[in-house]
Image (tube, rainbow, N blue to C red):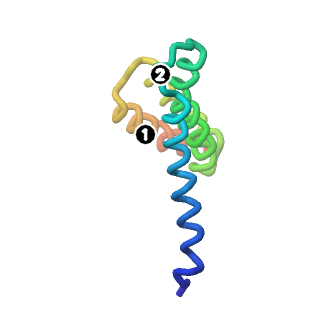
């Protein structure tokens, strides 16, 4: 069993980093942001982070790059056609499942 004195510094560092990453923008930006570049950057940042976290897992989750590409293509196509998230997730999963019979 790990002792509290061993874990506590790690928890405190994580809490400090989390607090600083949320509090620093409020201390730097007191007025409304009017810079178009910065607004655009902040608008697309969550999408970029989500993509950076998701795409590596997509290509390693099926065990076959070919089936992962089929599922990714299906998801991108349906998302481009503005289908609901549930439809995109189910259809891309079905595409991976069906392509695994033919490609793997």
Across and down, in percent, residue 3 comes to 54, 84
Residue sitting at the far bottom: 1
Helix, strand or loop under label 2: loop
Label 1 belongs to which residue? Answer: 94
Q: Is residue 94 above or below residue 1?
A: above
Q: Nearer the viewer, mark 1 or mark 2?
A: 2
Where disc 1 sits, the SS reads helix
- Write the residue at 49% across / 29% down: 74
The structure residue drawn at horizontal position 63% and vertical position 39%, both measured from the top left corner, is: 66
Q: Is residue 81 left or right of residue 57?
A: left
- Tell me the tag on residue 13: none
Q: Nearer the viewer, residue 13 or 70?
A: 13
Q: Quadrant of residue 84?
A: top left
Name the residue that disc number 2 marks: 31
Q: Earlier in the sequence, mark 1 or mark 2?
A: 2
Front residue of 41/82: it is 41
In this rendered view, identify the residue nearer to me: 93 or 47: 47
Label 1 neighbour load within 10 Å: few <14, some 14-19, many 20+: some
Image location (x, y in percent) of residue 55: 60, 39
Q: What percent of the width, then of the height, locates residue 86? A: 34, 35
Examine the rendered structure and indicate whether residue 80 appears above or below residue 22.
above
Residue at image point 57% right, 36% down: 49
Crowding around mark 2 (Cα neighbors within 10 Å: few <14, some 14 to 19, many 20+) is: few
How far separated are the C-alphas under marks 1 and 2?
48 Å
Front residue (pair 80, 23): 23
């Amino acid at each position: 069993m790990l002792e509290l004195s061993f874990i506590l510094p790690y928890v405190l560092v994580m809490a400090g980093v989390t607090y600083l990453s949320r509090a620093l923008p409020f201390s730097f930006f007191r007025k409304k942001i009017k810079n178009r570049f910065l607004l655009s950057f902040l608008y697309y940042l969550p999408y970029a982070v989500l993509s950076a976290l998701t795409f590596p897992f997509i290509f390693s989750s099926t065990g076959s790059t070919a089936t992962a590409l089929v599922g990714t293509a299906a998801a991108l196509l349906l998302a481009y056609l503005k289908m609901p998230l549930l439809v995109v997730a189910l259809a891309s999963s079905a595409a991976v499942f069906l392509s695994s019979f033919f490609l793997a």
